[in-house]
Image (cartoon, helix red, strand yellow):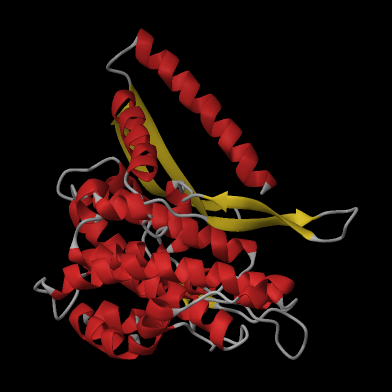
Amino acid sequence: DILESQFAVDAKAVSDALDGVLKEIPESKLNLFLIRNITKGQVQVVLSRSIKVKDVLMRAENWNKAVRENTPKLTLDLPSGKDSKKNIISAIQGASPITPYPDQVVRLLSRQWTRDGSSPIGTDGKPQKASHEVIGLSFGDVIDFMLRAEGKWEPTARRIINLLIQRITPLLIGVFGAKHCYGPRHLQGLPEPISDYPRDSRQTALQAVAIMGIILDALELRKEKYMKDAAFQVGQVLSLADTLHKDYCIVERKGQMPNSLIGTSLMRRALDSPAGALSDLAERMMEYVRWAKVAGISQDWFKDDSGRNKTIAVNEARKKLRQYQSLADSLASCDLPIECNDVMKAQLLLGFMASQPDDDENKE
């Protein structure tokens, strides 16, 4: 974290200096070299580019702008360290997608996440590995994409989204599925599933979301459009299904929940076949939909915290049921794809991870 913070400070200083150069010499160029140690005393130039300063600054701004403006509303809490007085882990509440540096994109795509991407504590008391190193893209590839090198950037963009889907999907489904579960175990004084995901894993997830926004922007798929597409809305339906399932468990099962909520359990199926996943969902959700339609609040519930939590769950279920049925009915009349390409998979994942629509948005 200290090194990244210092790099950010240094990068800003360089950027400010380039701004000054651009004002004095508008057509100035930046010679970019990347040198790597091969053996002791022997180095190799692995990247050499001569780029106009104005192009570098413009592309860097577009890179940041795509994250700010082309990702849906989406947050994760990031643990930030131990509180020395209370000896508890504090957190950055509601962190948004994190804009990655090009070298961070390289590192992110050089790891394959397994299982659900979590790092649970093993029998030896140490966190288990949830990812391993693989061959990814070169720094030059990412720079060519960032700077829109003619003839190179679009194939590289599609390669990035392909690797992202292949390698980061287990983490994304796992961490946001765990976020959807939050509530019952915490209220019972038990560890929440999200606690299996350390800061680095959550930070990687937020960077992956940012990369999706950058790629979709480069491919001219703007948030205002793709959030209305069927793939994104399938992800939203599965997220809403998770909430209804969780609320049902709070009220009817005394907070006891399965290892995976219904929407999360169907995400991999949805990435293969959105139409098939929605068909399965409609059948499996019948019990929870029927419950949400008739769920009532008992006056006896107000006597303790458990009852108040049930009241909150019933009220939330009623609201989410309206949103769920509206989206599900809309998708039922769509010609849903039997298979997904990588871009559609990214949209579906974004829908699953994004904040759920509120009633006002649903009426528009």
Q: Is residue 215 left or right of residue 122?
A: left
Residue 161, quarter of picture: bottom left
Residue 232, quarter of picture: bottom left
At a point 35% along the width and 74% down the height, the residue shown is 238
Whole-percent x, y for residue 242 in the image: 43, 76
- On screen, residue 287 above or below 157: below
At a point 33% along the width and 87% down the height, the residue shown is 286
Q: Is residue 283 left or right of residue 60?
A: left
Res. 25 in view: yes
In the picture as drawn, the residue positioned furthest to the right comes out as 85
Q: Please name whichever residue, 292 or 57, is drawn nearer the observer in this view of the structure.
A: 292
In the picture as drawn, the residue positioned furthest to the front comes out as 299
Q: Is residue 336 left or right of residue 235?
A: left
- On screen, residue 176 above or below 67: below
All told, the count of numbered labels is: 0
Q: Is residue 31 left or right of residue 344?
A: right
Whole-percent x, y for residue 4 in the image: 61, 45
At a point 47% along the width and 26% down the height, the residue shown is 15
Q: Please name whichever residue, 47 or 76, is drawn nearer the observer in this view of the structure.
A: 76
Residue 359, quarter of picture: bottom left
In the picture as drawn, the residue positioned furthest to the top comes out as 24
